[in-house]
Image: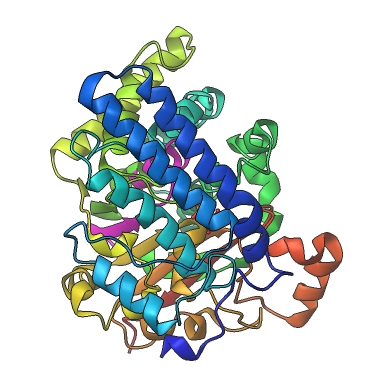
Amino acid sequence: TDTDIPWSSTGDINSFAHSTARKRWPVILQAAIEDVKETLVTKSGATKDEGEVIVREMTNVKDECVADAALTPLDDDNSSDIHDFNREIEVLGRPTWLNSPWLFSESYMYRRLQIIFAKSTYWKDYDIFKRQKDSTFLKSGAAVKELTLRYLNLVKEMKGAKNMSEDARKLLFTEMVEISLWGNATDLSLLTNLSLEDIQSLQGKEAIKNSQKNIVVNDTDAVWKLMKDVKGGQIDVVLDNAGFELFADLIFIAYLLASGIASTVILRPKNFGWFVSDVTPVDIESLFSMLRDPKSFDCDAESRRALDTLAAELEGHYRAGRIAVRVDAFWTTAHPFWRLPVLDSAAELYEALKNSDLVIYKGDLNYRKLTSDAHWAKTTPFVDAIGPMGRGSGLRTLALRTCKADVCVGLPSEDKERELLEADGKAWTFNGKYAVISYFDGKAK
Ligand code: F6P
Ligand code: MG
């Protein structure tokens, strides 16, 4: 079971888990408090009064975190996941914020905030991260325009070419996978460490080209071997961040549909604001309307036409159900994905994912959940680190992740690990410079 594995702990003072919990969580919590305060200015009467109570409750969460208090049981907001959170607190022996499994306490933090809103009368649907998600996306206009033009040209060429060579098809696939992969480099929750300039330098084509040498595990060949013969398949994408990453994912998805590899793509977002920048269903609609809105990005006529063309293509897929959105409460629990095939509460989701030709997990948090966020040797095969999601699971799992945590598996050799340690020290697993494309076919007999 997953409890036998040594999880990353916020109590391990030499880990990124620890510095995240001690330094970055208070910053994230304070920014969320400031966001509510900013909204309060525009409110009056009962909404404002309730908002002031909410600010006080959020401040309590921050104070408990900073004081390294024990994790207290969650209030019941009538959702099915509360019981599991509270049971785990008991099983773990009522741990503290700064001495608990990192994956658990970090998930708890976002769930704890959500309850405050869920229990309110006037703020039920409020997303404390929405303002930040939207404003950051609007700043990535240059990369959005560049990728849009590139996509439209590539697809035009693809459709124009009568018989594309297998090599060319593979290259196009590789390029599209990498666009989606590096879209994950712009994670807002790392903004407390990275400057916007750092982040923007990871966007765009040049950066993608340069970054290929930084993909330390690359199973693209194995994925292509499968996908090259798939026609009209179903692909599921367990989304990560809104804004630029979602945009990059949609480029990849538009390509999968245009090339005929997929006929249906199921997007799997979160139910509420999660790990700062994760996609909620509302963020998907916002992205479409921001692409359409002439005021969003500063565009010349050519770019404007391109954004409209892409938006129309995506909206067409969306209306026709070729791009569908499905939510599930499982994604905002603290459960590692090791439990997905065994939990009763995830049974329906598990069956749905088994129907998919390929399930793509975006980003760092999904990778931590796949690998149970544990201290694996870096050369551990991916299939071993994903436990019940691996052999015999009936699932095809592809992780596209830039490395932003302590865990990383699947390195080809110890020499490779030494090389990375020499270049970046231990930070290679969390500084966002490196990435992995890890794949396992759990349908294979
Ligand atoms: O510490 C990095 C971090 O904030 C982790 O908490 C989390 O795993 C990750 O970033 C979120 O990144 P992503 O959006 O790629 O899942
Ligand atoms: Mg995220």
Residue 353 x %, y % = 24, 69
| Segment tinted magenta in the rendering | 230-253
Asked if residue 121 is among those painted magenta in the image, a careful observer would answer no
Whether residue 205 can be seen here? yes
Residue 125 vs residue 247, the one in the foreground: 125
Q: Where 63 falls versus 385 (above or below)? A: above
Q: Where 100 falls versus 359 (above or below)? A: below
Quarter of the image where the N terminus is located? bottom left
Q: Where 274 falls versus 441 (above or below)? A: above
Q: Residue at left 40%, top 11%?
A: 295
The total number of labels drawn is: 0
Residue 185 x %, y % = 58, 47
Residue 282 x %, y % = 27, 37
Asked if residue 237 is among those painted magenta in the image, a careful observer would answer yes
Whether residue 276 can be seen here? no
Q: Where 295 falls versus 285 (above or below)? A: above
